[in-house]
Amino acid sequence: MPRVEKANFDNIYWIAYDDKRQLATKNLAPGVSVYGEKLVKEEGIEYRIWDPFRSKLAAAIIKGLKNMPIKPASTVLYLGASTGTTISHVSDIIDVNGIVFGVEVSARVARELMDRVVRFRKNVIPIVEDARYPQRYAQIIFKKVDVVYSDIAQPDATEITLENAKMFLQKGGSMILIVKARSIDPVLPTNQIVEREAKKVENSGFKIQEILYLSPYDKEHGFILASL
């Protein structure tokens, strides 16, 4: 039988399963597996195993994240929603009283997001648009958000994220920036790239709360958490 215990953050759990201690979230859409993750039931509640090799947010938690701005009832703007792996776990965490706007530029990928996630979850609103142009979806995001989460593979990903945060993030809100080092610079060491991008965030009026490196789960990736 699996053994479930609460993690340090709301709506996130540790499950002793398959002889391993694994991260999990309570499934908001029981019976539905988004990306092939295992579904585990304990005392009538279904949990989804959260794979840190597939989700940078899970990797950050396992690597020792101390502050988690995504909470029950949070409003989140998620840039780079892709096919729905991490955003589905965000959906679990924020629960029915929260909402996550998922921006994805590729119509093909967005269709997968809708088939795998949106059709089963009322708290996920897909936006098929380029995050470089936040004014194009400003009318869809009907209120200021608590968190901007960015996981986009562009050389100017930091600038794109900051522009979205400027438009949509409420005062006191948080920004999570996934730094894909090789998308920004093919040569410079990862730590130098992450430190440089963190300085851009700081110079834009944010306070850096945490910087994590996600190896071995995602090599050459950094995780920056900042507050406005």
Image: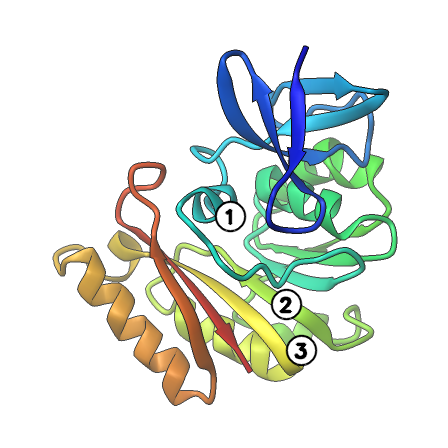
From the viewer's perspective, tell me whether residue 188 is left or right of residue 96.
Answer: left
In this view, 206 is above or below 212: below
Quadrant placement of the C terminus? bottom right
Q: Between residue 2 and residue 189, name the one nearer to us.
A: 2
Rate crowding at label 3 as few (under 14), some (14 to 19) or many (20 or more) other CA atoms within 10 Å: many
Residue at x 67% of width, y 27% of height: 4
State which tag comes first along the sequence, 3 or 2: 2
Q: Would you place residue 109 above or below residue 208 in this image?
A: above
For the residues bearing labels 1 and 3, Cβ distance under 8 angstroms: no
Q: What residue did someone put label 1 on?
A: 57
SS category of the residue bearing label 1:
helix
User: What is the three-letter code of the residue carrying label 2?
Assistant: Val
> Depth check: 54 or 135 in front?
54
Q: Which residue is mark 3?
A: 168
Q: According to the image, what is the colour scheme of the structure?
A: rainbow
Residue 202: which numbered mark, if any?
A: none
Q: Which residue is mark 2?
A: 147
Horizontal and vertical percent position of residue 68: 58, 59
Q: Is residue 128 left or right of residue 204?
A: right
Residue 82 x %, y %:
57, 44
Dividing the picture into quadrants, the one containing residue 198 is bottom left
Q: Position of residue 194 (x, y in %)?
A: 28, 65
Instruction: Give how far apart the Cα atoms at labels 3 and 2 are.
Output: 9 Å
| Spatial CA span between label 1 and label 2 | 13 Å
Name the residue rendered at 54%, 62% in the picture: 67
Of 132 and 173, nearer the camera is: 173
Mark 2 neighbour density, 10 Å: few (under 14) some (14–19) many (20 or more)? many
The image quadrant of residue 39 is top right
